[in-house]
C-alpha cells in the first residue's frame, strides 16, 4: 500500500467516522441529531375549548307526494324544527346532493324550474322561501342559533315547468352545524 | 494488515449506521382535554349525537410541524351507529382567517374515518395536522373543518356536525 492510498483511506475513514457519529443513537445523546427540529416544534401551541356541537331536526324526512308541473309545493315555514342541543351557539347551513331517481332511469336536473328541472328552497318561520338550497355548496339557514334554542323552518319545491316522465325523484338535504364565529 | 483493519473498521461503522434509528419527527403531546368536557351548561347529553371540541386553535405553526388533538364523537342513539369523519372545506371562516391552502386535505390525518360506535358510546378520534416541510402556505391564518356525519341516519333531512380548526402560522 503506497502513501497515496493510505492517505485516501484515512480520509475515507474520517468521513465514515463523522457520518457514523451523526447518524447513530450516540449522536442523540451528544445532542447533534434533530436538535433544531425539536426545539422549533415545541413552540407550536394547540388548545381547544371544551364545548360540544349537537343539533337535531324533526321530522327527519318529507314527501311532497305528486307534484304538478309549474305548481310549487311546500312544507309550510313551520314544517321542520331544528334544535341546538350543543353548549355553544351555532350557524346552520343547508346543501343537497341533487336529484336521484328512485323508480326509473330519468333524473331531473337540479336547478331553477324548467322542463324536468327543479330545485328546493328553504325559509324560516315568519319569512319566505328565499334561500335556494344548492347542490355542491351551502346556504346559511340561520346564524347564531344559541344553545338550547330552536328554529322552525320549511322547504319549498320549485316544481318543473313541464315533465317528460313521471319517475319518482329524491334528494337528501344535509343540515350542517358549526360553531358560530367568536374570538 | 492495515488495509484489513481499516476494512473491519468501515464495516463496523456501517453496521452501526444500519442499526441506528432515523431520528423521527419530535412527537407532540397534546394537552389532555378535560375528562368530562364540562362547560357552563353542564355535561353533554347522553342521548344526543354530539362532537367536541367545537373549535381547535393551533398557533405558531409552520411547514414541517405536526399538531394533534382528539375529537370526541358521541353516539346518542340506542343502537349501533356508524359515522363518517372527514376533512371539510369551511362554509365560513373566522375574522382574519382565510380558506385552507390548496392541498390542505392531504395534510389532515384522521385516525379512524368511519368509526362504528355502540349505543351511547363516546369515542376519541385522533386528528393530526401534518404539513410537509415543502408546503407553500401564503395565508398567515387559515381554517379548515372536520365533519362528522352519522352515515346510518335515515331520512331525507340529515345532520352533520363540524369542528372548526383555526391555524395561525409562525
Image (cartoon, rainbow, N blue to C red):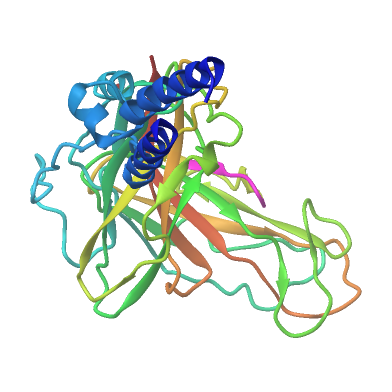
Measured as percent of width and height from the top left, residue B89 is found at 53, 40
The stretch of residues the image draws in magenta is A135-141
Rendered view: B42 above or below A81: above
Q: Is residue A2 visible?
A: yes
Measured as percent of width and height from the top left, residue A22 is found at 34, 26
Rendered view: B162 above or below A162: above
- Residue at image point 48% right, 20% down: A6
Point out the residue furthest to the bottom here.
Answer: A103
- Residue at image point 42% right, 48% down: B109
- Residue at image point 57% right, 45% down: A128
Measured as percent of width and height from the top left, residue B125 is found at 30, 55
Task: Verify whether residue A136 appears in magenta.
Answer: yes
- Residue at image point 24% right, 44% down: A147
Query: Along the line of sight, which residue is nearer the eye, B19 or B53?
Result: B19
Q: Is residue A182 visible?
A: no
Rendered view: A25 above or below A44: below
Measured as percent of width and height from the top left, residue A157 is found at 67, 60
Where does the C terminus of chain A fall, quadrant-wise? top left
Report whether A172 appears left or right of A19.
right
Query: Along the line of sight, which residue is nearer the eye, B128 or A107?
Result: B128
**Residue A17 sits in which quadrant?**
top left
Task: Verify whether residue A133 appears in magenta.
Answer: no
Amino acid at each position: 500500500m503506497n502513501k497515496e492510498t493510505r492517505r485516501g483511506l484515512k480520509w475515507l475513514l474520517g468521513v465514515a467516522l463523522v457520518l457514523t457519529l451523526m447518524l447513530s443513537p450516540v449522536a442523540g445523546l451528544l445532542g447533534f441529531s434533530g436538535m433544531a427540529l425539536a426545539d422549533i416544534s415545541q413552540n407550536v401551541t394547540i388548545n381547544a375549548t371544551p364545548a360540544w356541537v349537537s343539533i337535531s331536526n324533526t321530522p327527519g324526512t318529507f314527501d311532497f307526494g305528486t307534484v304538478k308541473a309549474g305548481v310549487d309545493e311546500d312544507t309550510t315555514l313551520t314544517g321542520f324544527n331544528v334544535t341546538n342541543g350543543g353548549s355553544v351557539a351555532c350557524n346552520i347551513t343547508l346543501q343537497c346532493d341533487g336529484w336521484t331517481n328512485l323508480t326509473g332511469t330519468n333524473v331531473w336536473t337540479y336547478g331553477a324550474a324548467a322542463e324536468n328541472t327543479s330545485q328546493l328552497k328553504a325559509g324560516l318561520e315568519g319569512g319566505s322561501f328565499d334561500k335556494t338550497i344548492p347542490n355542491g355548496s351551502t346556504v346559511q339557514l340561520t346564524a347564531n342559533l344559541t344553545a338550547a334554542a330552536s328554529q322552525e323552518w320549511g322547504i319549498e319545491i320549485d316544481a318543473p315547468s313541464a315533465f317528460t316522465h313521471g319517475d319518482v325523484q329524491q334528494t337528501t338535504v344535509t343540515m350542517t352545524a358549526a360553531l358560530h364565529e367568536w374570538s | 494488515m492495515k488495509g484489513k483493519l481499516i476494512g473491519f473498521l468501515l464495516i463496523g461503522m456501517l453496521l452501526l449506521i444500519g442499526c441506528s434509528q432515523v431520528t423521527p419527527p419530535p412527537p407532540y403531546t397534546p394537552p389532555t382535554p378535560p375528562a368530562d368536557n364540562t362547560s357552563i351548561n353542564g355535561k353533554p347529553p347522553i342521548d344526543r349525537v354530539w362532537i367536541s371540541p367545537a373549535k381547535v386553535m393551533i398557533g405558531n405553526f409552520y411547514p414541517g410541524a405536526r399538531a394533534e388533538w382528539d375529537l370526541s364523537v358521541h353516539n346518542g342513539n340506542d343502537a349501533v351507529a356508524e359515522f363518517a369523519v372527514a376533512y371539510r372545506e369551511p362554509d365560513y371562516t373566522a375574522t382574519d382567517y382565510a380558506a385552507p391552502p390548496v392541498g390542505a386535505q392531504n395534510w389532515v390525518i384522521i385516525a379512524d374515518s368511519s368509526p362504528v360506535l355502540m349505543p351511547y358510546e363516546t369515542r376519541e378520534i385522533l386528528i393530526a395536522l401534518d404539513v410537509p416541510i415543502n408546503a407553500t402556505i401564503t395565508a398567515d391564518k387559515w381554517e379548515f373543518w372536520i365533519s362528522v356525519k352519522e352515515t346510518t341516519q335515515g331520512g331525507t333531512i340529515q345532520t352533520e356536525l363540524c369542528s372548526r380548526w383555526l391555524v395561525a402560522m409562525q
